[in-house]
Image: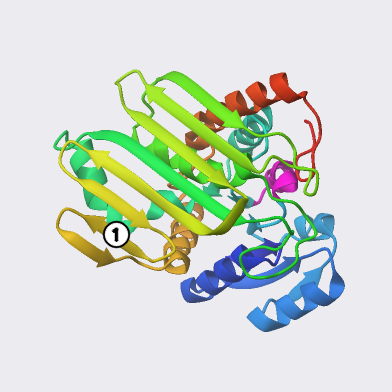
Amino acid sequence: MNVCMVGYGMMGVWHSEALQKAGAVLHTVVGRRADAAREFAERFGYRRWTLSFDEALADPAIDIVIIASPSEVHEEQAIRSLEAGKHTLIEIPIAMSLKGAERVVAAGERSGKAYGLSHPMRFRRERMALMERVRKGEETIRHVAGRFFIKRLVNIGATGYRRSWTDNILWHHFCHFVDLGTHLLGGAPMRRVQSAMGPCHPQTGIPMECTVLMETAADQSMVVHGSYHAAYRFYDKLIVTDRDTYFFDILAGTLRTADGTATMESEQDNAARIIFDFLDAARTGRAPLASGPAVIPAMRILQAVQDEWDARHGARAIPGRPIG
């Protein structure tokens, strides 16, 4: 299948390397700068590059579009790709509002094409046995916790590349954890969502800290907290069940349980599972593991947090998140 990659950041790199392993045809790169798009296409062996998203969508040879562009354009680009009849894989987040996510899902359902989300935490093979025990009723998840702390006073991403766009702690980094929580807890109804998100920072123009607390009707709980002010990085998640405790240290690449500590698959190898799953979904017509409808519960929670912030600080467009 012929693939078009929109964007050439870290996930564009990881997805391209996974596509090569899967035997997909790297057909077109869409970028915003000619020199960067050309270099990326040459490095990974894409057949062509362009600065025009419309031109790529009009190419009947392209079967799949992967949206790996800045977060604030995911919604618009995903809808256009689906309306052009392309199978579409969207980097996290699907959109930066609940209404936007629902618009993408509606477009996906109308299209009849495979469309899914790049939510890597759903794909961890080290968690599969736990999920099977939960499904069978042999183990019950009681609490989930996630932490994301990073220094982000200057707009430089994890690879050291200076970005032309601004990240969002709630709609990007917390989306990972909140979606994982709704996935792990099996879509249990939420009894309560509480949050604290700080005001816009005078230098960056965005909120720099956030905490989200969720409680289900089954008395399960989840908390996510983080900051863009941290002097050093934390990136981990904790799952507490009635049988064991699972601590995933994403930066160290380890999983600790009552039995000891084991090495996890690397983040990049884990992310490759998204590509393998989506290519199979596009070929067979099944829904991908992280489908559009499946991520809506997480988007509802994020929207509740955003609504609370808007009520306190005033709804407004901020860098990386236009109102819409």
Q: Is residue 7 left or right of residue 182?
A: right
| Residue 206 in the image, given as x and y percentages of width and height | 74, 42
- Residue at image x 16%, y 33%? 137
Question: Quadrant of the rendered structure where residue 80 is?
Answer: top right
| Residue 75 in the image, given as x and y percentages of width and height | 70, 41
Q: Is residue 122 magenta?
A: no
| Residue 179 in the image, given as x and y percentages of width and height | 47, 39
Q: Is residue 79 magenta?
A: yes
Q: Is residue 229 visible?
A: yes
Query: Observer-nearest residue: 47 or 324?
Result: 324
Residues in magenta, as a range: 71-86
Question: Quadrant of the rendered structure where residue 175 is?
Answer: top right
- Residue at image x 39%, y 49%? 237
- Residue at image x 72%, y 77%? 41
- Please, what secondary structure does the residue beneath circle 1 have? strand
Eyeballing the image, is 165 above or below 35?
A: above
Q: Is residue 143 left or right of residue 62?
A: left
Q: Amino acid at mark 1?
A: Leu
